[in-house]
Structures are given as C-alpha cells and as structure tokens.
Image (cartoon, helix red, strand yellow):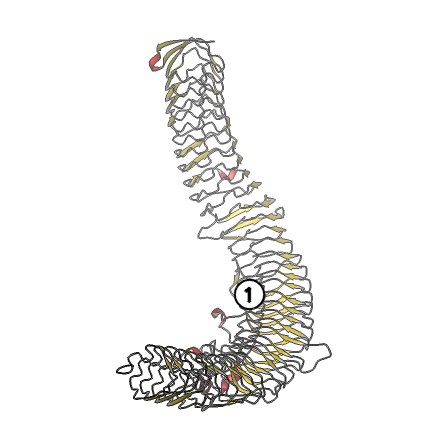
Amino acid sequence: MATIVANDADHGVYTITGDVSESQFANSTYLRSIDIKECSTIGEYGFFNCTNITDVKLPDTLTKIGTRAFSDCYLLNKITIPDGVSTIEDKLFYFCTSLEEVTLPQTLVTIGNESFRFCTSLKNLSLPSSLSTIGKSAFSGCTNLTLFNQNLPNNLRNLGNGVFSTCSKLTNIKIPDSITVLGSYLFNQCQSLQSVTFGPSITHIGDYCFFNCYNLVSISNLPIIESIGDRAFDTCSNLRFISLSNKIKSIGVSAFKQCEIITTTDHTFDFSQLTEIKAGTFSDALHDYYTIQIILSDKCKKIGDYAFYMDKVYINLQYVEYIGDYAFYKTSAPEFSDSIKYIGNSAFYGCGFRFLNFPQYLTNISSFAFAYGHCDESINLNIPNCVTHIYGNAFQGWTFDQVIIPSSVEYIDKNAFLQTMINSFHFENGCKKLGKYCFAKSGIISMVLPDSLLIINESVFYQTKLGSISLPKNLEKICKFAFIFERFDIWYQFSSTLSIIFPESLRIIEEKAFYRHVYLRSITFLSSNITIGDYAFYGIANDDENGNNYPDIYNWHSYDYLDPKEYVNRIDEQLKEYAANVDFCQTYSEGEKVKIGKNAFLRAWINIKFPPNMDTISDYCFTSAFIFDLEIPNTITKIGDYAFSRAVFKPFSTNNLNRNLKFGTSTFAYTIINNFTLPSGISFVNPGLFSSCQCLKSIQIPHVDYIGKYAFFNCSSLEHVYINYGCKEIGEFAFSQSGISSITFPDSITKIGNNSFSHCINLKIFSVPENLLSVQYQTFANCTNITSIDLHHVSSISSLAFYHCINLIKIIIPRNCKIVDSYAFSDCSSLCSVIICQNVTTSPFSFSNCTNLNLIVFKDTSTIKNYTFTNCTNIQHIVLNHSVGFDEFPFDESLPKQN
C-alpha cells in the first residue's frame, strides 16, 4: 500500500510513494495535484471518483494501471502514461470530462473497453504504432476528438464495436489492412466524418457502423464487402457513389435507409447472392436521376418492409414470394410473377404501372397495397380467383375502365375503392360483405352488386356518384348513410342521374341512407313490407342535371320581399321532370305494411304515389319538400306533427281523404297550399295545423269541437271562415294575423282564446257568439276594420281585448259585465260614444287614448276607476245616474275640471 505525504495540504498537493492498492484513494476529495513515485502498479479504482484531481505525474517505473483507476475524475486535465505500460485497462479514464491531453506510451498494445468513454474534452490524440487492440466503445462520446494523423496504426488487429461512436469531430480516417471487420456502432453518429478508407481484407460492416454520418461522402473498397449489418449507413444522406459486390450475401435491415442519393456507375445493383432484401434496406435512398436496376436471383424469396420505400428502382420479381409493407411505396412498380403469395400493406402505394396483372396464387390484397397507383392508360382490374379478402384502401385513388370481382372474394374492407373513378364494376356471385366507405367519394358509371350480398353496410357509397346500380335480388337491409351524397365537384366529369329499383326482399332502409342524394331521380319499391328510416331520402333530387340547386323552397317564408303567391308562379313546370319519382308497390299481402320514418323525405323534390298498405305519415316526413301531383289516399289515417310543414304542392288534392284522418301539430304549417277541405270525421282542428299558410284562400271546417291554437295563424290569404255549430272553443292565436274579412260564429262557442283574432286587419264582425261570456286578452286587438260590435251577453272584457281597433265607432258595455280590464279599448281612436250599463266596473286605462270620444253614458251602480279615460281629450257630453261611483281621477286631466 502506498504512503502519502502532504506537500501543500491547503491546495491539495501530495506525494504518493509505492504501489497504490485497490480503491486506496477512491472518492478522495482532498487530492488536487499528485506526484506518484516508486510505483509499479496502481490497483483497480485506485483514484476512482477523486473529483478534485486536476493533474497527475506518473513514474517511469509504472507498468500497470488497473480498471477504472482514474474513472470519474471530472477535473483531471492532462496525463502522460510512461512507456512501461502496455495496456490501458477498461474504463481507465471513463467520464473524465475535463481531460484534454493524453500522451500514450510507445509500448502500448491494448486500449481496453470504454477506456476514454465520455472524455468530452479530449482533442488531439496520437495512437502509437505498437497498438494492436482497441476495445469496444474506447473513445465513444469523445465529442471533440481528432486523430493526430487521421490514420489508425498499421499493426492494429482488433477494432471493437462502437470505438468512435459519437466522435462528432472526426473528419477522415484510414483503417489499416490488418482489420477484417468494421464492428457495430464503430462510427455511429460521427456527424463530421467525410471519408473512410480501408483495405481489401474487410468483409463485414457491422450494425449501425456509420449510422447518421450525414456528411460521409465516400467510402472505399465496398465491392469486397460480403455482409453489411442493420442500419449500417442509415441517414448517410450525402453518400453518393457506392459499388457493391455481386457476391454480397447479406444486407441488414435499413442498411442504406435515407441515404437519399445513392447510385452506382452502371446504375445496377447485382444482388444475385441475397436470399432476401431485408426491411428498409434502401428505404428513401435511391433518388438519383437515373432509375437503378436491381438484379435478384431465384434465391431471393422475400422483400421486407420498406425495402425500396420511395426509391427510383426497377426490379423483376420473378422468384419473390413475399413482399412486405411499404416495400415499393411510391416507386416505379415492378412486374409481377405468379410466385408472389403475399403483398403487404401499402406495398405498392402510389406506384406507376405499365399494366396490372396480379399473381394467380395471391389470397389477400392488403390495406393500401395499391392505393393511389396509376397507369398511363385506362386499365381493367381483374382480381385473381384465389383472393378471398380485399382489405382497406387497397385501390384508393385509382382509375379503372372495368373491375371484375370473382366469386372467391367474400369480403371487401372499408375504403377499399375510396376515391376511385370506374366505368364498370361487376361482381360475380360470392361477396358477402362490403366495409364502411368501401366506394366512398368515387365516380362509378355502372355498378352490379352480387346476389350473395344481403346487407349494404353503413356509408358504403358515401359521396359516390353513381350512373346506374343494380341491387342484389336478395338484399334485406340498407344501413344508415349507405348512399349519402352531397355534391362532390370532382366527379362532375360525367353527368348522370340515378334510378334505383329496390328488390322485393328489402325490409329496412335505415336513417339517412340516401341523405341529400341530389342525383336520385327514380325510386321503385318492389317490396310491400318495408320500413324506411328517419331522414332516409332527405333532400333527394334537389339539383338539376348540371349540379345547380333548384329555387330555394326552404326559406321563402322568412323573406319579407318574397310573396309566396308569386313564388309558386316562379316554379317552372318543367322542373317536374327533375323531381324524383317515388313508386311504391301497389299490391300487398295480409300483414305486410310500409312504414316511413320521421323526416324521411324532408327537403326532397318528388312525385310520389303512396302504397295502399301505409296508414301513417310520420312527423316531419315531408317537411320543406316540393311535391308534384300529391294525393293523400283514404288509407292514410294519421299524419304526424309538421309532416308537410314548409312544403310546396303543385297541385294538391284533398278529395279522397279518410273521413277519420287524424292530424298532428302544425302538419301543414308554412306550406304553399291554396285550399283545403278537412275530413268530415275529425273532432278538432289541431294546433298550428295551417299556421302561416299564406297562400291558403279557403278552408272547409266540418263539425268540430275545438279549433287549436295557431291553427290558422298568419294565413294572410284566407278571407272567409264558416264554423259549424258544435264548436265550443277557438284556441289562442287561432286566426291571428290572418286575412279573414268575415267569420260566422255558431252560438255553441263558449271560449275564444287570447289573441285569437288579433291583427286581423280585414275582419269586420258585428257580434260575438251568444254563449261567449268573456272576451280574452287581445282577442280582437288591432282588428282595424271593426266599426261596432254587440257584446250584450258578455260578463268580462280582458286587457287589450279591443286594443287599437281604430275604426270602432261606438260600444255598449252590457249590464252585469263585471269587469272591463286595463287597456281593453285603449287607442280606439275613432270611438265616439261609450255606454256603460249597470253593475259594470272599469279598470285603469280601460278607454285611454280614445281621442275622439265625445259621449259617455254611465248607468246605475257602475264603478269607474282612476285613469279609466286617460287622454280622452275630446269628451263633450257625460250622462250620469245618481248611483255611479267614481274614483278620484277617472278622467285624469281629460276634462277641463273634475267635480
């Protein structure tokens, strides 16, 4: 064991004498500068982790330094190793990050594993000619290292893996002829390395040997190499001219990946000795101006994933059996041979083909296998008889003249023919399933589906322009969104409308199946037992043959400047030929029934003939539709809420309605309809039934008990209404804002709701029903054509009941009318005389602002509240009986003086 003497303890200066034993001074923080004397051996970990040592003087007597003797001495700056030392042991100076200068002995034979690893400050280093072995990762991570003469010693026999890995300052290096193998990671990420020279004895280049040496321009003697490891030249993006031997036996995974511009003098690589092209071998590497020809022999059976990804290559696949994923992604496609049994995902994505003949033993076509491929001329696609599955996006983006799917194909996956353009598509009987979006966003002029197909799945023909389609005769179900189509301009290169015949076997068309299919012009149902889902035919036929929208039929009612009567006249009768003909089967067997869901034909342009076995028109079924020649048969017993709201009929017949037909709320609201005869069997007029039907001129109302609220609201063309005896109630806003000028009230009416006739500016009536006891809130407000009205049996008049009836001249408030509520006759500016009979009580402002009121007669026991006649500034005559009661200010300054 060595002895230690302090020369200057305060500054960490010591002299050490004798052999240093194992770990003797390990982790000593007091040592800074040491002078070692009379020492032949420094044991393992002798000065390990002495983090404050800056310099060491070694004696000439030293012959051995143990493993990690100076490892992790972070501040050690320089050291000279005497000539007596022949071996630098493993990790001797590991992580000495401040070590800048090392003088190696001329007697040095071996540099051990990781000896100088992560000596990031180490710069110029001269390797002695005696050196025979450099262990693995010896200089790995020496990011500032340069070699003094840029040559490795000629006596070097062993060069370990990763010796110069991440030595990012190395620029050029010569490897002696004595080296036979360039090991794995040898120059990994030497990003300044430009050239490497080695002799003819090297036959193998290891994995990641030159990985990410992106400034490497040239490398000598590649023709003698027999094997190249995985990712050996990966990302050597400036490596250009290389020559490979035709005797090369192995090229590893991604060996030349992303080399970008590799080429060879004769533009040919002879790989006749290879048994496979491994994954990513030349991925994104062969981008030279000239196409590289790849020569394979009958030994090569497999081409791995990404092998020639995005390369400019031509290759004959005569003997290949397996082609991996992305193998020829966006390359010039090779010629196929019958030897191929498997083609991977995206294997030929984006490739250009001269012709497309598939290997006859291929069983599956993988996802994206031929997506976005192309050919100079239109070609036919004939799938081999061995293929059972075509997977997702397999032929996306292609243009074909004809496609024939053989009976062997059982399943075509989602997006398989997405965004294709096909003249003729034909199935032999056999396919049982089509995946979602199988033909989405495509243009297909003619399509024949196989009888083996029982279900058309969701979104199969999503946004697909079809010229014609023949559905399977055994088809049972069409799923939601199957034929949804809103104009997709890319396919306007062929103009066509679509006719569909639904087979007798069809039982269900799900929701939105043909949503917005603007080119659908003819629909024929052979089935008499079918359910049509919600929104199934929403907006069909809503374009002309050139893709132009028809006149807006949805929002005409929202524009003040567009008179709906004029709108009807603007509809060209020739547009009828563009409407979709909807023909239902007119025969049926017992128990069979047709059901149409909510919103099924919303915003559609159609001619329709209802089936005889249909009894209900669902809610919103034809909302905002344009319907030619509509006739509702007497088999229909119920029409749901808003079923025809906002629709346009040209014409519309009500002659054959079922007498017991039941309507829903607002069934015909906002429709463009001229006249209507309600069935004789109905007992009430539903709320909102004809609300805002501004073209409705006449209505025949049978014996009903009730007219619902808003039933004829805003029917501005309606002039006369006759209500038969038996009707007991008229609901709120029932005729508000309508155009009626006269109405016949039966005495059976006992209630008229709030605002029932408000804003009926043409209405002129002289009495209210005999049994009506109360005039409700705003019932006749703003009825500006009423001049006088008999209220002799009324017991109460509510607020604003006759507000702003500006042509009302006189009024008699009958005896026993318990209350005339606030503003009941306010703003009746033409009112001249008011007679208030016995037992009447007014309210504040009951007759306010009646500026022409001249005569008021008060009879016995009336009560006149404050402000009743506010602002009645023309009062000249008041007749009083002695028992009339007045509040303090009933006239509120309307008279010059009140007594």
Residue 762: give x, y in percent of width and height: 42, 89
Q: Amino acid at mark 1?
A: Ala
Q: Is residue 361 left or right of residue 598?
A: right
Q: Secondary structure at mark 1?
A: loop
Quadrant in which residue 620 is drawn: bottom right
Residue 755, visible in the rendered structure: yes
Name the one closer to the observer, 14 or 727: 727
Residue 114: give x, y in percent of width and height: 48, 26
Look at mark 1 in the image and give the residue it sits on.
Answer: 440
Quarter of the image for the C terminus: give it.
bottom left
Q: Is residue 513 left or right of residue 555?
A: right
Residue 387, visible in the rendered structure: no
| Residue at x 31%, y 87% (from the top left corner) | 852
Name the one closer to the observer, 536 or 635: 635
Residue 671: give x, y in percent of width and height: 50, 81
| Residue at x 60%, y 86% (from the top left corner) | 679
Q: Residue furthest left?
A: 896
